[in-house]
Amino acid sequence: MTTFTHSRGGAAAHTVRELRDGLADGRCTAVGLVDHYLREIDATAESVSAFVEVFAADARRQAEESDGRRRAGGPLSAVDGIPFAVKDIIGIRGRRMSAGSRAVDIVPEEDSPIIARLLAAGGIVLGTTRMHELAYGPSGLNDFDGGARNPRYPGIIPGGSSSGSAAAVAAGLSPIAFGSDTGGSIRAPASLCGIHGFKPSYGLLPTGGVHPTAPTLDHLGFLGASVEDLRIVMSVFAGNGFLDGRAAGRRLAAFEDPGLEVDPAIAKALRATLDALSDRGWEVESVTAPAGFDVMDVSTTIMAYEAYRVNKERFEKTPELIGADVRERLDDGSRVTRAQYEAALQEVDRVREEVSALAAPYDALVNATIPVAAPSVEAAVRPDVRRMLMRNTRLQNLIGAPAISLPGAHGGPNPWGVQLFSSRGTDTALLATAAAVAADLEA
């Protein structure tokens, strides 16, 4: 029986693939996995602080049931017996959901559809993870509970809003984690914590029972240690042959926005990455972002309008229970008019068609996940820094397109990430392309 080593401060020790294979051939048990991760979570409660609540008894019970199914020869899926961390914005029956805020106190009577899928597949819920308050901020810092800490890059923010989920995977506290992404909240934490994060096409994973931020832009997705892990979980939760998908070709395009200033070190590292892929047989070209479209202005208008209305009652009745940074953003949203909101939605319709046309000839469009050097905890309180964190990840939410962040290679300021994205509905092909890209970069 495999004995698991502690992984604090280093790379995640075990991938979903490794654990799945270990369960299948008897080298480990689900109970053994759960006990291992519970020890790790307990040992890092102060140093990483990734979890809000740990469900030790329930996790062990779920693990015992999984081991029983496997002994009987009937595992439910590829993730039967695999532990998951769950962002504290996703409803779990009988468990308190706070969405990282003192202003939210919900105990769902039913599991959200995505948790129901997880349990039906035999997955195990380790507990809920910390997040930027109300999923409405890019830093992962939280006035309420202090937030999670970046386990790989001390002093650097973990990124928001799925900060605890990213920290849990990066610290080896869970092999996979659920996140939500309204403007980059999976991909930015993945980039900042040196792991992989995937946001699928809009609506591919159900958001029912998830505390909303801006419903037009909200997505669910996963953070993991490898592209293959993301493909495994997507094959279970969304089907569509994610494990069998193959890259359509070997064509990439650097997605360039003339209006965006990119940190020179990151631009250099991205160029070196694309050159390395070209050397390995990829055809690399470049495309330019649609003209006359301010991604940040349009996305901020939509997000602010919707987030204010989602949180209007708590903002007006108990503003003192909301952290200063989120309260300020909600106040901004209160001044966005219906006419401004509808005009922004019309702009999105136009740009969705233009980006789809740009992406059509390629396997993926490529840019840096975050265009600036990873900020320190102290620097991330500045509004201009916060704004730049999500500059490259807002477009994909606006158009509902799939996107993935891979850990950056070929130099650059650690940490940094490479983002690949494509047209809405091309999730299987994009993950296949990302797997091929990752393999070539690691070769």
Image (cartoon, grey):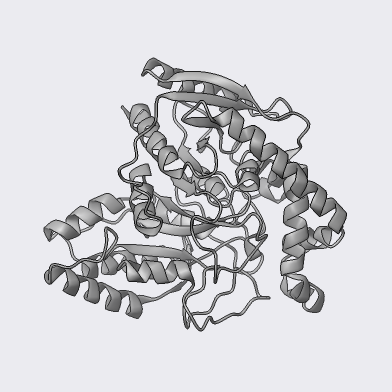
Q: In front: 298, or 241?
A: 241
Front position in the image: 294 or 156? 294
299 relative to 147, above or below: above
User: Does any portion of residue 353 appear in the rendered image?
Assistant: yes
Residue at 28% x, 79% y is 61
Q: Is residue 77 left or right of residue 327?
A: left
Q: Position of residue 213 (x, y in %)?
A: 66, 62
Q: Could you say which quadrant of the image residue 172 lies in?
A: bottom left
Q: Is residue 273 above or below residue 178?
A: above
Which residue lies at the image location 87% right of the left edge and 54% below the top edge?
339
Q: Is residue 317 left or right of residue 172?
A: right
Q: How many marks?
A: 0
Which image quarter: residue 64? bottom left
- Estimate the x, y position of residue 129 in percent, counting from the top left: 49, 65
x%, y% of residue 70? Answer: 16, 68
Image quarter where the C terminus lies is top left
The x and y percentages for residue 106 are 59, 80
383 left or right, relative to 405 = right
Q: Farthest residue in the top direction?
A: 279
Quadrant that contains the N terminus: bottom left
Q: Residue at x 76, y 42 (%)?
A: 347
Asked whether residue 10 appears in the rendered view, the answer is: no
